[in-house]
Image: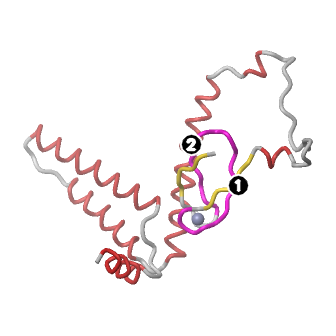
Amino acid sequence: MLDRLKNEYKAVMFGRNGMDSLNRALLALAAIVAALQFLFTLISGRAGGMYAAAAGLVAVAVFRFFSRNTYKRGAENMMFSQFWMGLKQRRAASKANRAPNPYRQNPYRQQPAKGKKDASGNKDAQRRTKIVTCQKCGQKLRVPKGKGKIRVFCKNCGEAFEAKS
Ligand SMILES: [Zn+2]
């Protein structure tokens, strides 16, 4: 029964865009807008147009979900992910600027050499990176190692997902 449903879902979704980062963001934004409208009506007793705006956002997400133009949807998703990652990086950068830099504090402490070969012959860069597979398109991506849970941005389809490093 569940298998049949799964197969039918697969058949319906074949060649379609499905869920991606942009759709998740659209649905989250729709939920926020609807919640704001709910609060606004609760406080002021007046209706507003924000439910319509939320419905519009959901409609866009549904359209993108079932769209067969995966090329265009992928490009949209990529643009959105780049914009989102840019925002996050800017926030992280301003945080990092506030945190003390250990190398600046102690000039005698050496920064790790880049691209130097270790005893096993592996390049330094290779030891400190790892390969993860994109959850959406299967693209292999190189990410820094030992940074805990990180946000990975697929250069192929634009999907953003979390991975252990
Ligand atoms: Zn991908």
Are discs 1 and 2 less than 8 Å apart at CB? no
- Assess whether residue 143 is covered by the magenta stretch: yes
Q: CA distance from mark 1 to mark 2?
A: 14 Å
**Label 2 amino acid?**
Lys
Snapshot quadrant of residue 96: top right
The residue indicated by pointer 1 is 142
Determine the residue positioned at 35% across, 67% down. Answer: 60
Where is 134 relative to 148, above or below? Answer: below
Residue 142 lies left or right of residue 92; in this view the side is right
Magenta region, residue range: 135-155
In the rendered image, the vertical position of residue 162 relative to residue 79, given as above or below: above
Q: Secondary structure at mark 2?
A: strand
Q: Secondary structure at mark 1?
A: strand
Q: Residue 86 in the image: x percent, y percent?
A: 58, 47
Disc 2 target residue: 149
Position of the C terminus by quadrant = top right
Q: Badge 1: how crowded within 10 Å, few (<14), some, or many (20+)?
A: some
Res. 157 image quadrant? bottom right
